[in-house]
Amino acid sequence: MSASVTTIPHAINNYYDRLLLEREKPYLVHPNFGQVRNIPVGGTGTIKFRKYGALTANTTALTEGETPAGTNPSVTDITATALWYGDYITYTDKVTIESPDPVLTELTEVLGEQAGLSIDTLARNVLVQGTNVLYADATSPKANAQTSDVSATDVLEKVILDTAISTLRSANAKYITNFVSPDAGYLTSPVAPCFVGIVHPNTVVNLRAITGFVPVEQYANKGDVMPNEIGKYDRVRFVESTQAYVEENAGNGTIDVYHTLIFGKDAYGVTSISGNAMNMYITELGSSGSADPLKQRGTIGWKANHITKILNQSWMIRIEHAIV
């Protein structure tokens, strides 16, 4: 991501630019594993993701001297339009003069947190609408078929993780081999091939109790550990986020139902207009001219351009469950 600042000297620009992104990045979890496609400046703000279908096996022998009919590939186009989001805070000369705190620094930190939270929430709200879903069920035979069926004993367990993994593998979902580094904007960092799961901190107790779960502290190679990663089960590496979706009072007995997402490569895409993923703007006191003749007001704010789009429902699965 990039950030820009207006009307403030260059050295100060760089400081607040970095500060905004530093405070933004802890909240960016859901967008970090999507297929990234930037929209060129000067376009309509709409991008077309193109998906080519897999070809079936060809078991027909060639006839000598005859050219076969060939195969037409199947193509699916998925369009998405990046939208604009943003917010700002007005500060006054009195605050900057009398406050013992560095006001712009404090405001930048608050806005950075809001910006990251906003973008992550937008991405999460799209991903939890996926149609591929499993419902935890501690009963036998299993009968849960909707969110309201999930009871307090229906926690995340080994059998449902195995089902989710086999479902993704059966759909030929590919392992993720890189993720968007929050330290470098939309640049990617390599990671050992895996599916990725996003879990809420309240789910971690159940996850750690599953036989076969390996906490990140026991990894042989800690060099490629992802931000917020807590461990792995089979080929799923789990990252923790307080932003993981919780559907309050939605389960049986009005319990909260937690949503754990597991997905493979290219299950979804994220995009923005190039150079406008995240911009920051600071205006000095009095920058509005005659509307502020005594230089009493200034503003600081952020503006972002973003869209998240599910590209392949079969390569993403949602587990709805309770917690201990």
Image: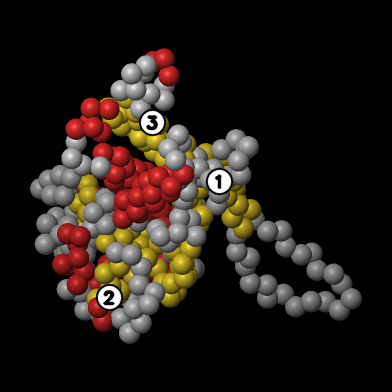
Q: Position of residue 278 (x, y in %)?
A: 44, 44
Residue lying at 26% horizontally and 81% vertically, measured from the top left: 218
Amino acid residing under circle 1: Ser
Task: Decide: few, some or many residues near mark 3? Use Cα within 10 Å; few <14, some 14-19, many ≥20.
Answer: some
Residue where numbered disc 1 is placed = 274
Q: Position of residue 279 (x, y in %)?
A: 45, 41
Residue lying at 35% horizontally and 30% vertically, measured from the top left: 299
Colour scheme of the picture: secondary structure
Q: Which corner quadrant of the image does residue 12 belong to?
A: top left
Left or right: 222 with respect to 193? left
Residue where numbered disc 3 is placed = 284
Determine the residue located farthest toward the bottom in the rendered image: 220
Q: Earlier in the sequence, mark 2 or mark 3?
A: 2
Q: Report how far apart the C-alphas of labels 2 and 3 lie in the structure.
A: 46 Å
Amino acid residing under circle 3: Glu
What is the secondary structure assignment of the residue under circle 3? Answer: loop
Q: Nearer the viewer, residue 122 or 77?
A: 122
Determine the residue located farthest toward the right in the rendered image: 65
Compared to 217, does 254 lie above or below?
above
Residue where numbered disc 2 is placed = 216
Q: Position of residue 109 (x, y in %)?
A: 29, 45
Q: Earlier in the sequence, mark 3 or mark 1?
A: 1
What is the secondary structure assignment of the residue under circle 2? Answer: helix
Q: Nearer the viewer, residue 284 or 257?
A: 284
Residue 56 can be seen in this image: yes
Task: Decide: few, some or many residues near mark 1? Use Cα within 10 Å; few <14, some 14-19, many ≥20.
Answer: some
Left or right: 3 with respect to 19? right
